[in-house]
Amino acid sequence: MTKPYEVLSLDELDRIPVTEGLEWRPLRRRLGIRAFGTNAYTSERVGGLVVEEHVEGSGHEELYLVVSGRARFTLDGEELDAPAGTIVFLPEHDVKRKAVSEEEGTTVLAVGGWPDKPFEPSQWEWYFESYAHEPERAIEILEDGLRQLGERAWLLYHLACHEALAGRRDDAREHLRRAIELDPRAAERARDDEDLAGIEP
Amino acid sequence: MSERGWAVARLDEIQGPRARQGYDWRPVRRHFGIRSFGVNANVAREPGDVLVDEHHETGGDGGQEELYVVLRGRARFTVGGEDVELGAGSFLFVRDPAVQRAATALEPDTAVLAVGGRPGEAFVPSSWEHGRYAVELSERGDNEGAVRVMEHALEERPEHAGNLYNLACFESLAGRRDDALDHLGRSIELDASFRGYARDDDDFAPLRDDAEFQALVAT
């Protein structure tokens, strides 16, 4: 039975290395939150990323709160000093944003969602986590994502990657083919993806 | 919102009406004009101060999942009758809207952020946010301003019994008898419990001797 409430501390959240010192601390999935997106990001070293450079391709509004330490945000090229307690809100999804840790152990909490439409979890939560595991466990994680979200191009694409690494070449071929049907950009990406070497959809 | 496509504020720069129970309310959502989820913070000045009002999330604005994040200090939450002490960097997620929850500060300057939304539904701001602003305006004597705030709340949530009732309260205080009776009547049609509230509500003192008001609130 699902508990009516749950308690945990930031220290109990997983640390999934992503890039340039950035550790993803998956919060939404851990708690099973269904109404909005929320995750934390930590860099233990000064100069590490706490928000990866990106625009919000999903179209989300995003709020970033510096929970601890100090970060330097760069928003469409403009720099911003953000000590703990600073809130940065980006209603425009196409603002290029990133943030770098200015103190060891800086953590940023991100909250996101769409105005005027219900929240749906992002595919990346599953495929980011999958790369922290061996292929067989990664496959289980992506299959869980497909069960929860339904057929999604990038879940299938990354499933194909892990299946290829696990030697399940027929499954990889089939899932890559379906990913490309759903999003033709997957074909372009697959051409240079070493995980999919020799897999022809 | 600036033309830059982003906005920034320190939590303690965000000012809102003072909550009746004493904590400082930081209306983050309203400050930034956030439209996709609810988010606000409360800051309690002293140990023992109320940090989160006792409430559940069913009712007119109901159905919200809520995530509480202790940003600094330490708090005792009471959730579904159980006590839980949480320090800075702790999360409490209440997925069941029917669970009663409240919190008290255990240290000076304890701050908690609350984030909420309804699974499977586009976000609509909660009516109580408007209500707090309306109350503050009314307490300053600006009942017409309070009426405007609640009219805006009603545009966001038409046929919301609580909004209609609160609008009627401020219309009564503003001397708008006919509007107040119309909106009170509609709120009672939607939720009969407002009949009892209206009977004892000082906001309706200007209408107490009015025969139409008396008929509306009669059992």
Image: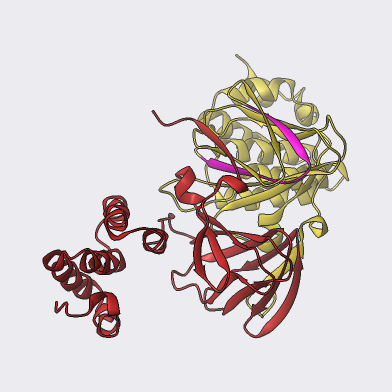
The colour with which the image depicts chain B is yellow
Image: magenta residue range: B64-78
Q: Is the stretch drawn in magenta largely helix, strand or loop?
A: strand
Based on the displayed image, in which of its 4 quarters is residue A62 positioned? bottom right
Q: Position of residue A20 (x, y in %)?
A: 56, 74
**What coloring was used for the rendering?**
by chain
Based on the displayed image, in which of its 4 quarters is residue B73 positioned? top right
From the viewer's perspective, is A49 left or right of B136?
left
Q: Is residue A106 above or below residue B183?
A: below
Q: Is residue B200 above or below residue A199?
A: above
Q: Position of residue B171 (x, y in %)?
A: 73, 41
Pick out the residue farthest to the left. Answer: A170
Q: Position of residue B9 (x, y in %)?
A: 76, 65
What quarter of the picture does the C terminus of chain B occupy?
top right
Of A119 and B169, the residue lying toward us:
A119
Of A90 and B1, the residue lying toward us:
A90
Based on the displayed image, in which of its 4 quarters is residue A66 positioned? bottom right
Q: Is residue A185 above or below residue A162?
A: below
The residue that appears at 64% across and 79% down in the rendered structure is A75
Q: Position of residue A121 (x, y in %)?
A: 41, 56
The residue that appears at 73% across and 76% down in the rendered structure is A80
Residue A33 appearing in the image: no
Say whether residue B72 is magenta: yes
What quarter of the picture does the N terminus of chain B occupy?
bottom right
Say whether residue A62 is magenta: no
Residue B104 appearing in the image: yes
Of B173 and B98, the residue lying toward us:
B98
The residue that appears at 52% across and 73% down in the rendered structure is A93
From the viewer's perspective, is B121 left or right of A105?
left
The colour with which the image depicts chain A is red
